[in-house]
Amino acid sequence: MGFFKNMNELTKQGREMQKNMDVGAQMANAQTRMAQAQEMMAQQTAAANIVSTGTDAAATVVAVRPGGGMVNFQPIMALDLTVMPPAGAPYPVTVSQPVPPNLAGRLVPGASLRVKIDPQNQQALWIDPAS
C-alpha cells in the first residue's frame, strides 16, 4: 500500500510542476545557450585554422572573467587582451575560450602570452597554451 501511496503523491507533484512550468521561457533560454555554443565553436574553428596560417605576436592579459559554461570540463573564460603585432600599433581583443584548470591560475592581468593572429582578421587569434 505504501508504494501506491508514494506513486500517487509523485503524480500529484508532477502535475503541479507542469502547471508552473513556462515552456516558452525554457525554449528561449535553450536557444540563447545554443547560439552562444555555436559562436564559441566558430571561434574555436577559426583559432584552430590560425595555428597554421597565423602571424606570431605577443599579448598582455588586461582582464579575465567567467564566460559561462564548460567544454570538456574546462571553464569558458572571457579574456580581454592587448595584442602587440610585430608591425603596427597594439590593439584590444576580447576572446572567449575554454581554459584548462591548470592554466587558469596563470591568466591574471599583466600576464604575457604568445598568440597567433589571423592576417585577414586581427580580432581572431589563437593563444599558445604553452605560453
Image (cartoon, grey):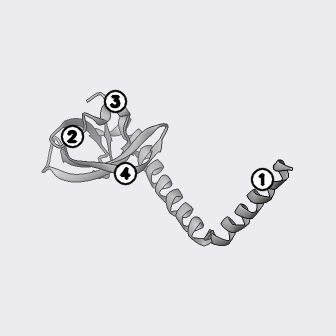
- Residue 130, position in %: x, y? 29, 27
What element does badge 2 sit on? Answer: loop
The residue under the point 75% across, 64% down is 12
- Residue 31, position in %: x, y? 55, 63
- Dot 1: within a 10 Å radius of its alpha carbon, few (fewer than 14), some, or many (20 or more) residues? few
Where does label 2 land, which residue? Answer: 108
Q: Which amino acid is tagged 2?
A: Val
Q: Which of 122 and 78 is in front in this view?
A: 78
Residue at mark 3 to residue at mark 1: CA–CA distance:
47 Å
Q: Which of 21 and 32 is in front in this view?
A: 21
The residue under the point 36% across, 33% down is 101
In primary-sequence order, the first of circles 3 and 1 is 1
What element does badge 4 sit on? Answer: strand
**Residue 103 vertical placement versus 126 (above, below):** above
Q: Are marks 1 and 4 in contact (CB under 8 Å)?
A: no
In primary-sequence order, the first of circles 2 and 1 is 1
What element does badge 3 sit on? Answer: helix
Specify whether residue 128 is in view: no
Where does label 3 land, which residue? Answer: 102
* Label drawn at residue 67: 4
In primary-sequence order, the first of circles 1 and 4 is 1
